[in-house]
Image (cartoon, rainbow, N blue to C red):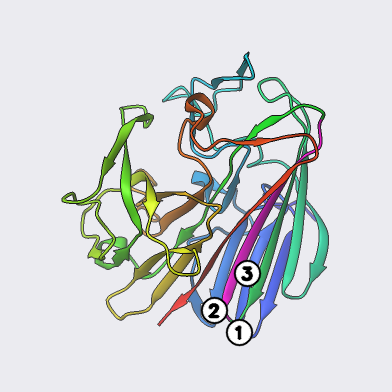
Amino acid sequence: MSVLPSGEQFVLRAGDAEATAVEVGGGLRTYRVGDRELLDGYAPGEMAQHARGAVLAPWPNRLRDGVYTWDGAEHRTPVTEHERGTAIHGLVQFVSWRPVQRAEDRVVLEHLLFPRPGYPFTLRLRIAYELSAAGLRVTTTATNEGDVALPYGEGHHPYVLAGPRLDDCTLVAPGGTRLDTDERALPTGWAPVAGTPYDLRAGRRLGDLVVDSCFTDLVRGADGRAEVRLTAPDGRGVAVWLDAGYRYLQLFTGDVVPEPRRRRGLAVEPMTCPPDAFRSGEAVIRLAPGESTTAAWGIGPLG
């Protein structure tokens, strides 16, 4: 039997819900409830193109020229987005993750990232996927297993589904401030969303709005969670929540994704830090030797 491009499949079941996490990249390939697909995922025989369902660590989004300075030393990581000259979405998208705990409705995947040129640190990553009637919960824990402090950030990259096309869907998103970017999709400064098409806090039909932006100042409920809601005209859809560990949110309408997936799913990306954070220092987590950090997000059906 040939090996699947996404490696071993970890299928979770709870009632009429089913989700699939994968060995390659440790990401989320599918999630359905009954006959409803909540993710625009990918087939077992496909690679995870356009970071579909990916884990983004030890940094999310883009790093300018793949260069940053940490504790006085300059580091150069491989440029992986050649057309823009950036190192995008970290180092673990196509590495193997191993299961360390398994149950019918839960799996914990782990990857030990060893030192390498550009990131000479030892980082243990664990992701717990837990499926229940309430939805799917994803908890990420990072631990510094080395003997020097390291820089860390992470995110996730699911594409959520509500209707056949995003244009007819209504999006409610919590960001009060949006990051402006240049032609390389790198940060130029923060600006309030009030009075702009990107003020999604009260909700709007997407229509032809193009979004590939990072947001912060997220509106949160009494439980500390921020929430994104994408609904089709019939009122059915999907909700994504972020706990306080995720202060930033990237939304991407997929306009550069080739057909037939163009503007079909919305990438909703919880992030602990903004783009180019290793250079700016904004919200980069400093992990001392032996120290850990944890953040959680989740997804579930609406309607």
Does the magenta-highlighted stretch encompass residue 141? Answer: yes
Q: Give the secondary structure at mark 2.
A: strand
For the N terminus, give its image quadrant: bottom right
The secondary structure making up most of the magenta span is strand
Along the horizontal axis of the image, is 13 left or right of 68? Answer: right
Rounded to the nearest angstrom, the CA distance separating label 3 from label 2 is 9 Å
Whole-percent x, y for residue 45 in the image: 63, 55
Query: What amino acid is found at the position of numbered circle 2 in the picture?
Result: Val
User: How many numbered discs?
Assistant: 3
Q: Does the rendering let one see residue 263? A: no
Residue shown at the point (81%, 67%) measured from the top left: 102
Asked whether 121 or 65 is in front, the reply is 121
Q: Is residue 187 left or right of residue 154?
A: left
Q: Are marks 1 and 2 in contact (CB under 8 Å)?
A: yes
Residue 16 - label: 1
In the rendered image, which residue does mark 3 sit on? 19
Mark 3 crowdedness (10 Å alpha carbons): few <14, some 14-19, many ≥20: many
**Element at label 1:** loop
As shown in the figure, which amino acid type bears the numbered disc 1? Asp
Upstream in the sequence, badge 3 or badge 2?
Answer: 3
Work out how far the residue at label 3 is from the one at label 1, CA to CA, in angstroms.
10 Å
Magenta highlight range? 134-146
Q: Is residue 101 magenta?
A: no
Tell me if residue 96 comes above or below residue 1 in the rendering: above
Amino acid type at image mark 3:
Ala
**Neighbourhood count class around disc 2 (C-alpha, 10 Å): few under 14, some 14–19, many 20 upward:** some
